[in-house]
Image: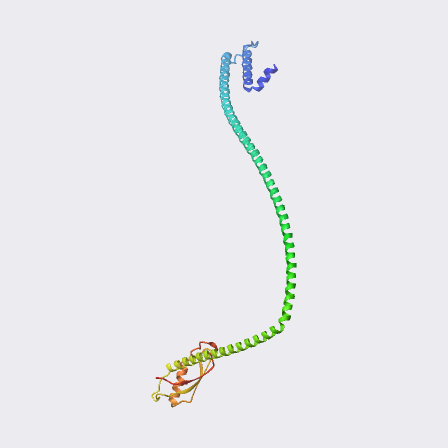
Amino acid sequence: MRALLKEIFQNPLAMLYAILVHVVLGAVLFVSLEWTDAPTPAQPRVDIVKAVVVDESRILAELEKLKKAEAQKKKQENAKQRKLDKKAKEAERKRKREEKRLAKLRKEREAEKKHQKKLQKKRKAEEKRLAAERTKKKKELNRLQAEQAALEQQRAAEEQKLAEVAAQLKKEEQQRKSAETLRRKRELEAAMRAEIAAEQAHRNTENEKRLNSLRGRYIADIQNKVERNWIRPPSAKQGLSCKVAVKQIPGGEVINVTVTQCQGDEVFRRSVETAVYKASPLPRPSDPGLFDREIVFTFRPRK
């Protein structure tokens, strides 16, 4: 009985079938009973058998409908279960592929770890070798530096001895040649002074000649420019001349003109002054040291 109840509760459709069967049996038993009370005349007779048949057909139709629904549901559940099984299989395949991939990664990681350990071991060995080599080189360098210092000290001592010997020899040589050296020195100094004086005099003469030449050229340039700007008056004769004193500023601008010792008349003198002012600014000397604010020259026109 417990097993039957358990199955009924686990399967709702079976439980519904059982209820419907009990309802049908109860209805049949009810209509088959004989009642002692006669029906009243006013009450119509009911066709109980027909009602029972109708109810039973409805129940059967409902049962058939329930069977179809249960079959459809079972079909859907089966389809759903197949989908779930398919997804489970696919998930299982993915899981296996993932396990293979992870196993491959673990294997590669282990191989990489071994490789890194090998490299680390090799690097440590190389660092140890380099450290030992540096230590060896440092010791060798210290030894060489010590030897170099000893050699430097020895050479310094030898040089000091040589310097002392050279100083002694020099002192003796100086004492021996002191008088002769002094005499020769004085003679040489006298000869050099004479040579320098002669050279200086020659230089002064050459410089004076050069300056005189440049100054003559400078005065000639001024004379030529004044003559180019001079207009001969009608009363001026050939062979006239005069002294011209010109005051100028560093740019060559003429600020004053004085004509003296003029052989011509007043018109000739004024024409010379006008020519000097028209020639302003005057030419500059090739050597700036020759510039003079006051220039005196003889104006003697050639035309």
Extreme-left residue of the structure: 234
Front residue of 168/296: it is 168
Q: Tell me: 302 left or right of 295.
A: left
**Residue 187 seen from this side:** yes
| Vertical side of 132 occupied by 186: above or below | below
The residue sitting at 60% across, 75% down in the picture is 183
Q: Is any atom of residue 45 visible in this view?
A: no
Of residues 57 and 127, the one nearer the viewer is 127
Q: Nearest the camera: 139 or 51?
A: 139
In the rendered image, residue 279, in percent from the top left (x then y), is placed at 40, 80
Give the image location of residue 104, x and y in percent.
54, 31
Residue 283, quarter of picture: bottom left
Q: Is 288 on the left or on the right of 136, as rendered?
A: left
* Depicted 27 relative to depicted 146: above or below: above
Q: How many marks?
A: 0
Q: Nearer the viewer, residue 115 or 62?
A: 115
Q: Position of residue 37 (x, y in %)?
A: 57, 10
Q: Position of residue 56 (x, y in %)?
A: 50, 14
Figure quadrant of the C terminus? bottom left
Colouring scheme applied when the structure was drawn = rainbow
